[in-house]
Image (tube, rainbow, N blue to C red):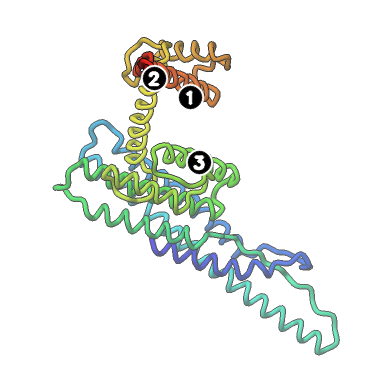
Amino acid sequence: MKRILSILAVGVMLLGACSADDSDDADDTTTTEAELNAEEALSTFCEDGDTYVEALDTYGQIFTEEEPTVGDLKEGADPLMDAREQAQESGDELKAAIEQQNEEAAEAEEEAMKEAEEAEAAGEEPPSTTSTSLVEVDVSEDTLTGVENAEGNFTATTEGIDDSTPLSEASVSLTSAAYALEVSWLALLTEAGCVDDEGEALAQVREYVAAAQSDLELAGYYEGTIDGIWGTETATAVKELQAANGLPETGYLDPPSQAALAEELAGQESNQVSALQGVLKSLGFYDGPIDGQWSQQLEDSLKEFQRELGVPETGQVDEATLRGFQDRLAEVDQAMIDSTSTTLAPETTAAPTTAAPE
């Protein structure tokens, strides 16, 4: 996959250097054969990259089946390797097309400068120039590095698994590696302009990341801002989650990590429900079991408390309800303190009188 990375790295360098040469002042704009070839090569690369991502997704889903086998694992690898090879070939063709396009653009620019110099020497008007445009492939170095690392990790993971590897271990390792590779390629294809509606795609990614950050925060792994940006803090939080659950520390919220997070949140929710049941029971609004399970009885009890409190009966623990709990519990505590103080207070007795001395 380093071939594809070098292709895009060269593409970014050359296209970035030449894009500034495009000018609105150009007298004429033509589309050369090299430009058409580059556009077609980029289109093919986008299609093959999309196929590769789909193959990675399909491969990862093998391990979500109830009883995957080593045979399923090996069989599913064949179409994945085919898609990977095709993406590499398309990348080579894209590199060649971009290089050819830049060579022709450089030659045209050199010829135009020569003609302009000759015209100036002869005291003539310079000839009209022809401007050529290049296909933009604006991929960041971080994205390229991410793909390279994910490809290397996936290769190392697959090479480290043989017929003696426990299936459960292979499933987790390969699912994590395939997911990381899929995410990195999605970022690459988005930046390369392969997504029809890039703005919508990025908005969906932001929404997904923000939800993940919120869940990680609830589970106690994330303390940063809920901003929808998958940065170092978010990746570190995921690695901490993975480490706590004995999973490969990829920094990506892959299916095994999602399952672990969901399980932790479910346990946390159960504890919160138990606490709510206990509070309502202590205040005399709930007489059901304290089992951490949300029920209609619990919701009705909560609404009854809200009704008496004079706040909207939402059946949810909102800010107004929390304040109500605090006030009522404080009243109960004060009543207990007053009761205890009354019980333990010493009895008052009349002071002894002494006879006045005669």
Residue type (three-letter) at the residue carrying disc 2: Ser
Left/right placement of residue 137 relative to residue 255 reads: right
Mark 1, Cα crowd under 10 Å, few <14 / some 14-19 / many 20+, is: few
Q: Which residue is mark 3?
A: 210
The image shows residue 338 at horizontal and vertical percentages of: 42, 18
Q: CA distance from mark 1 to mark 2?
A: 22 Å
The image shows residue 2 at horizontal and vertical percentages of: 39, 64
- 208 and 278: which is toward the camera: 278
* Viewer-side label of 3, 1: 1
The residue at 20%/41% (across/down) is 167
Residue type (three-letter) at the residue carrying disc 1: Gln
Q: CA distance from mark 3 to mark 2?
A: 51 Å
The residue at 53%/17% (across/down) is 314
Which of the two labelled residues, at mark 3 and mark 1, occupies the earlier sequence position? 3
User: Residue 290 appears in which quarter of the rendering?
Assistant: top left
Depicted 48 relative to depicted 31: above or below? above
The residue at 56%/69% (across/down) is 14
Q: Which residue is mark 1?
A: 326
Depicted 160 relative to depicted 279: above or below? below
Left/right placement of residue 22 relative to residue 209 reads: right
* Viewer-side label of 1, 2: 2
Q: Residue furthest left?
A: 164
Q: Which residue is mark 2?
A: 341
Mark 2, Cα crowd under 10 Å, few <14 / some 14-19 / many 20+, is: few
Does residue 77 show up? no
Which of the two labelled residues, at mark 1 and mark 2, occupies the earlier sequence position? 1
